C-alpha cells in the first residue's frame, strides 16, 4: 500500500471486475429472504447530475449491506424515455441545424431520437460504473422496450374497459412550444409582471344605463382571449347586479352580442364582481360554460398564434396580439385604465414557456376510484412506510384532492395510444394490437404521458403482465424505493395506485424520500445560475468513495443537502485516515495472522474495550440503516474509526507490538486484524472501492468484500465495565494533555503527576494500565493514591472517580487557574441543571427505556460529584491566594 490514499490507484478496473465476476447478481438462494430495489430510471435527456449520484449512493448502500447480510438481493437498473423532455432536447438540436420535426416527418424524427437515446444511455452506463452501483445489468430495462410497452398497452386497455380511461373535450394545460398537453403537476407557477386591463363592455341597448353608465367595467389580465368571450357573469346573490342578469353587452372590437348570466362561481368581493366567461381559455369558465350551455370559441392555434376567430389579429403571436389589442382598445375608447400587477403564471416544467389553458380533446384517467382505493389501502391494508413520516400526510392530501389525469401528449416520441378510429364510421377501437383490417383504421397520433409508463416500473420491470414470471413472483413487491421528495405526485403516487389496481399490492414496502442538492449558499443548482456541479468532475478530483461518503454523512431523510468542496476535503481526509490506519495494521501483521479473536480470557482492558465499542457501532449502524438514518450511521462509523480505533486503540497497541511479550504481540495483531476486517465490512456499503482494495490486501481467503459476511452483533462482546474503565483512562490522559496545553508544557517534557483516587476501582484501573499512563502522559514522578495531598500550586482536573494534579508552580498563575476552574464549574452546573430537568420530566422517566433513564441518572451523579470536587478545589486555591 502506498503512503497516501490515491483514488486513481484504487478505483480503476475494480468495477469492471465486479461485473465480470457476477457479484451483483441475485444469489439464487431460495432459502434466503429476497430484497429488491428498482432504480428510479433517469431520463435519457442528458448526463446524470449530483442528485442522481445521491439517489444511487443511498440505494447502493442498502443493496450492498443486504447482500452481505445474506439476503437474495436484486437491484434492477434502467432508463426512462422521458417523452416531452427528450423530444424537446432533440428538437432543440434540430433547430440549431435549421430543421424542424415536421421537415423530417414522424418516422425519421423518431430515428433521430433513438440516436440520442443510444448516445446518452452509453454516457449513463459509464457514470453508473464510476459511481460503483451494484445493479444486475442482465435485467436492465427501458420504458420503451418491448416488455414494458406490452404492460403499458394492457394497463391502458384494461382501464379503458373498466371505464376509468375516457376521451373528451376539456380545458387542459397546453405547452405551445412543445405543442402538447401537460398535467397539472408539469406546470410550475412563478410570479410574472402583468396588468389588469379595465375594459368597457357597452350595453346592446344603447338607451340603457346602469349606475349612470352605458357600459359595464370588466377587468382582465389577458385581453388576447377576449374574442373567445361568450358571456359576462355575476353572482346570483349579488344584489348590486340583479337587474343586469339577462341583459346583453357588446364584445369590444368585434361587435358580437354576449349575455350577462348569474353563476355561483363569481366572487362578489373580487374586483368589480363581474367576470368575462371564456370557456375555451379558462378551466373555471369551461365549467361555467357547461352549466349554461355556452359556446366554446378557441382563439389560438397550437403554437399560441391567434387563429381565424381572432379576426384581424389572426397569425399574430399571443403576446404581440395582446399589444395590438390593447392599443386598439385605447384608440377606440374602450380602455378605462391599465393597472400594473405581479401575478402567478403557469410555465411549462420542460420548455419554460408560459402555459395556455386550452380547449382540447384528450385522453384522461378517472382518478377518484383509483385514489380512494390507494387511500383505503394506506389506512386498512399493507401500507407503504413513508420516510420521513410527514410525507404520508402530503401524499394523502394530494390523493384526497386529485383531479382527473390528462394522459395524452401531442408528441411523436413515446408510447402510442392504443386507440384506432375507423376512417368510414368514426368508431373508436381500443386494444392491445391494431384491428385486423388495419387499412380502414387510423391510430391515434398522440403518445402517453411519460409518467403513465414509469408508474408501472416496479412491476413491469419484473415481467408483469406475466404473473408467472420468476422475478415477479420472487421480488415483487419491491422492498424499498429511494427517490426525491419532489416527485411524490409525479411518480410515487402513480406507482402506488397503478400497482394496487393491477397487482393488488403496494409496489414497495418503504419509500425513502431525500431532498435536493443545493450549492453552498443554499440555492438550487441550475443552468441559469451557473452553479451546477458535475459529479464526474468531483470524482476525478476526490474519488468516488469520498463523494459517496459526503453524500451519506450529509444525508437526513427528507432534508436538502448543501454541496461544498470543504466538506469534500473532509471526506477525502477521513478515507486517507482509514487508509493510513489500515496500512499501519497490515504492516504490523505476520504472514500467519488471521482476523480471528484470541481467547477472551487473554484480552487486556484495551482489547475488551475496542471489541465492545466495535460491537456497539455494529449495532448502531445496523439500526440506522434499518431506519434509513444514513447520516447517523456515517457518524457512528466515523466516531468509532477516527476516535476509538485510530486515536486510541492503535496507539495503545504499539506498546504490545513493540514489546518483548510475543503472546501479547500475537494477540494484539489478531485483534487489530479482526477489528480492521470488521470495520472494512461495515464501511463497504458506503465506500466500496477503497474497502475492497484494503480488504484484499489483508490475510484471508475471501475473493471479494462485496460478498463477504456483514458484521453481526455479538451479545458476548458487550462489556460496559470495560468501556467505563477505558473511558476513565482516556479521560485521565486527556485531562493531563489539556492541562499541559494550558501552560505550554510540551509532551516531551517529563512532569510530576499526582492522581487522587476516590474509590478502589478507579485506583485499580489506573494501576493496571500504568504503562499507558507512562506512554501518553510522560510523568517524571507518578503517584496514584486515595490520600494524595493537593499541592498549593498545581493545575487541577476533576475527572470521574479522581482528581488530577500537575504541580507546575513556576508555570501557574493562581488567578488564571481559579478562573479556568470556575469556567469548568459553570459547565458542570449547566449539565446538572439539564440532567435534573430531564429526570424531573415524568413522561421521560415513564416512557424512556430503563437503560436510558439509568444512564441519565449515572451521568447526573457523575456531574454532581465533579461539581463538588471542582468547587472544593476553587475554595482551596482561593484560600491559598488570600494568604
Image (cartoon, rainbow, N blue to C red):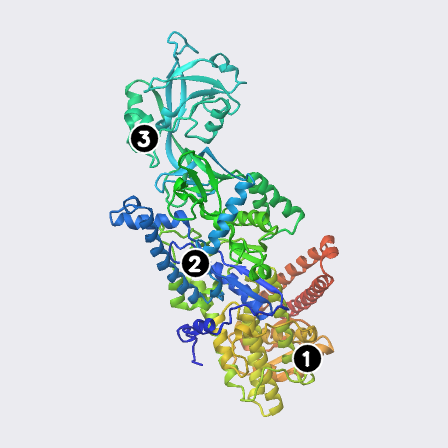
Q: Sequence-wise, which precedes: disc 2 or disc 1?
A: 2
Helix, strand or loop for disc 1: helix
Residue 93 or residue 825, whichever sits in front: 93
Whole-angstrom CA distance, mark 3 to mark 2, is 42 Å
Residue 638 or residue 525, whichever sits in front: 525
The local crowd at label 2, few if under 14, some if 14 to 19, many if 20 or more residues have their Cα within 10 Å, is: many
Helix, strand or loop for disc 2: helix
Task: Give me the residue at 43% from left, 77% from top.
Answer: 4
x, y percentage for residue 127? Answer: 41, 63
x, y percentage for residue 259? Answer: 43, 17
Whole-angstrom CA distance, mark 2 to mark 1, is 50 Å
| Circle 2 residue | 50
The local crowd at label 3, few if under 14, some if 14 to 19, many if 20 or more residues have their Cα within 10 Å, is: many
| Circle 1 residue | 765
Task: Give me the residue at 59% from left, 84% from top.
Answer: 670
Q: Nearer the viewer, mark 2 or mark 1?
A: 2
Which of the 4 image quadrants contains residue 732? bottom right
Helix, strand or loop for disc 3: loop
Task: Give me the residue at 54% from left, 45% from top.
Answer: 158
Q: Sequence-wise, which precedes: disc 3 or disc 2?
A: 2
Query: Taking 376 as reference, is 551 above or below it?
Result: below
| Circle 3 residue | 306
Q: Is residue 744 left or right of residue 830?
A: left
Which quarter of the image is occupied by the N terminus? bottom left
Q: Are marks 3 and 2 in contact (CB under 8 Å)?
A: no
Number of numbered discs visible in the structure rendering? 3
Amino acid at each position: 500500500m502506498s503512503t497516501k490514499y490515491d483514488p486513481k490507484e484504487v478505483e480503476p478496473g475494480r468495477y469492471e471486475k465486479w461485473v465480470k465476476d457476477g457479484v451483483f447478481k441475485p444469489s439464487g438462494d431460495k432459502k434466503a429472504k429476497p430484497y429488491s430495489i428498482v432504480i428510479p430510471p433517469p431520463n435519457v435527456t442528458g448526463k446524470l447530475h449530483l442528485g442522481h449520484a445521491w439517489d444511487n449512493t443511498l440505494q447502493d448502500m442498502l443493496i450492498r449491506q443486504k447482500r452481505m447480510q445474506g439476503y437474495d438481493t436484486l437491484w434492477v437498473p434502467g432508463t426512462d424515455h422521458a417523452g416531452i423532455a427528450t423530444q424537446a432536447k432533440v428538437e432543440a438540436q434540430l433547430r440549431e441545424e435549421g430543421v424542424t420535426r415536421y421537415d423530417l416527418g414522424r418516422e425519421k424524427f423518431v430515428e433521430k431520437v433513438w440516436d440520442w437515446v443510444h448516445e446518452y444511455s452509453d454516457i449513463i452506463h459509464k457514470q453508473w460504473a464510476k459511481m460503483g452501483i451494484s445493479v444486475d445489468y442482465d435485467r436492465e430495462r427501458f420504458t420503451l422496450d418491448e416488455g414494458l410497452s406490452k404492460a403499458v398497452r394492457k394497463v391502458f386497455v384494461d382501464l379503458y374497459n373498466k371505464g376509468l380511461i375516457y376521451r373528451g373535450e376539456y380545458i387542459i394545460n397546453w405547452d405551445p412550444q412543445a405543442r402538447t398537453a401537460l398535467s397539472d403537476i408539469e406546470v410550475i407557477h412563478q410570479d410574472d409582471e402583468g396588468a389588469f386591463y379595465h375594459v368597457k363592455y357597452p350595453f346592446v341597448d344603447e338607451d340603457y344605463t346602469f349606475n349612470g353608465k352605458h357600459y359595464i367595467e370588466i377587468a382582465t389580465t389577458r385581453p388576447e382571449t377576449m374574442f373567445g368571450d361568450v358571456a359576462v357573469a355575476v353572482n346570483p346573490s349579488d344584489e348590486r347586479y340583479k337587474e343586469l342578469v339577462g341583459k346583453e353587452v357588446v364584445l369590444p372590437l368585434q361587435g358580437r352580442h354576449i349575455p350577462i348570466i348569474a353563476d355561483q362561481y363569481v366572487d362578489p368581493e373580487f374586483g368589480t364582481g363581474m367576470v368575462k366567461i371564456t370557456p375555451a381559455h379558462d378551466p373555471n369558465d369551461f365549467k361555467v360554460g357547461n352549466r349554461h350551455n355556452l359556446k366554446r370559441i378557441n382563439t389560438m392555434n397550437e403554437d399560441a398564434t391567434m387563429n381565424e376567430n381572432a379576426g384581424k389579429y389572426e397569425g399574430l403571436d399571443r403576446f404581440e396580439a395582446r399589444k395590438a389589442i390593447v392599443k386598439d382598445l385605447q384608440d377606440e375608447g374602450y380602455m378605462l385604465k391599465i393597472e400594473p400587477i405581479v401575478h402567478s403564471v403557469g410555465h411549462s416544467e420542460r420548455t419554460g414557456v408560459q402555459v395556455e389553458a386550452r380547449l382540447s380533446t384528450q385522453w384522461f384517467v378517472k382518478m377518484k376510484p383509483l385514489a380512494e382505493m390507494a387511500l383505503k389501502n394506506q389506512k386498512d391494508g399493507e401500507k407503504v412506510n413513508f420516510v420521513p413520516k410527514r410525507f404520508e400526510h402530503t401524499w394523502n392530501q394530494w390523493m384526497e384532492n386529485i383531479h382527473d389525469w390528462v394522459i395524452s401528449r401531442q408528441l411523436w416520441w413515446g408510447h402510442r395510444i392504443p386507440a384506432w378510429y375507423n376512417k368510414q364510421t368514426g368508431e373508436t377501437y381500443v386494444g392491445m394490437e391494431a384491428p385486423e383490417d388495419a387499412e380502414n383504421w387510423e391510430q391515434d397520433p398522440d403518445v402517453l404521458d411519460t409518467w403513465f409508463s414509469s408508474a408501472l416500473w416496479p412491476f413491469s420491470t419484473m415481467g408483469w403482465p406475466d404473473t408467472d414470471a420468476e422475478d415477479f413472483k420472487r421480488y415483487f413487491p419491491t422492498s424499498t424505493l429511494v427517490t426525491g421528495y419532489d416527485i411524490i405526485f409525479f411518480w410515487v403516487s402513480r406507482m402506488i395506485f397503478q400497482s394496487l389496481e393491477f397487482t393488488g399490492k403496494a409496489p414497495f414496502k418503504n419509500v425513502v424520500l431525500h431532498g435536493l442538492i443545493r450549492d453552498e449558499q443554499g440555492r438550487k443548482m441550475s443552468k441559469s445560475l451557473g452553479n451546477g456541479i458535475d459529479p464526474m468532475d468531483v470524482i476525478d478530483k476526490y474519488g468516488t468513495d469520498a463523494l459517496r461518503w459526503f453524500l451519506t454523512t450529509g444525508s437526513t431523510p427528507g432534508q436538502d443537502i448543501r454541496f461544498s468542496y470543504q466538506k469534500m476535503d473532509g471526506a477525502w481526509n477521513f478515507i486517507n485516515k482509514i487508509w493510513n490506519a489500515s496500512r499501519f495494521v497490515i504492516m504490523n501483521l505476520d504472514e500467519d495472522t488471521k482476523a480471528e479473536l484470541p481467547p477472551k480470557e487473554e484480552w487486556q482492558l484495551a482489547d475488551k474495550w475496542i471489541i465492545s465499542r466495535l460491537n456497539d457501532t455494529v449495532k448502531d449502524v445496523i439500526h440506522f440503516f434499518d431506519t434509513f438514518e444514513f447520516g447517523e450511521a456515517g457518524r457512528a462509523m466515523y466516531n468509532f474509526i477516527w476516535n476509538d480505533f485510530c486515536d486510541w486503540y492503535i496507539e495503545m497497541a504499539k506498546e504490545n507490538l513493540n514489546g518483548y511479550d510475543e503472546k501479547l504481540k500475537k494477540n494484539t495483531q489478531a485483534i487489530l486484524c479482526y477489528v480492521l476486517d470488521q470495520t472494512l465490512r461495515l464501511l463497504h456499503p458506503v465506500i466500496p472501492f477503497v474497502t475492497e482494495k484494503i480488504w484484499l490486501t489483508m490475510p484471508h481467503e475471501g475473493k471479494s468484500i462485496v460478498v463477504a459476511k456483514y458484521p453481526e452483533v455479538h451479545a458476548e462482546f458487550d462489556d460496559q465495565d470495560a468501556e467505563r474503565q477505558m473511558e476513565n483512562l482516556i479521560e485521565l490522559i486527556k485531562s493531563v494533555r489539556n492541562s499541559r496545553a494550558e501552560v505550554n508544557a510540551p509532551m516531551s517534557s517529563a512532569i510530576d503527576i499526582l492522581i487522587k483516587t476516590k474509590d478502589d476501582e478507579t485506583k485499580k484501573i489506573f494501576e493496571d494500565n500504568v504503562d499507558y499512563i507512562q506512554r501518553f502522559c510522560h510523568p517524571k514522578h507518578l503517584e496514584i493514591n486515595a490520600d494524595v495531598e493537593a499541592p498549593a500550586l498545581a493545575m487541577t482536573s476533576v475527572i470521574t472517580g479522581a482528581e488530577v494534579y500537575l504541580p507546575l508552580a513556576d508555570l501557574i498563575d493562581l488567578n488564571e487557574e481559579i478562573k479556568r476552574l470556575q469556567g469548568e464549574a459553570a459547565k458542570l452546573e449547566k449539565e446538572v441543571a439539564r440532567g435534573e430537568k430531564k429526570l424531573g420530566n415524568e413522561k421521560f422517566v415513564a416512557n424512556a427505556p430503563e437503560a436510558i433513564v439509568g444512564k441519565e441518572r449515572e451521568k447526573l451523579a457523575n456531574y454532581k460529584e465533579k461539581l463538588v470536587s471542582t468547587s472544593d478545589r476553587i475554595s482551596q486555591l482561593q484560600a491559598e491566594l488570600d494568604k
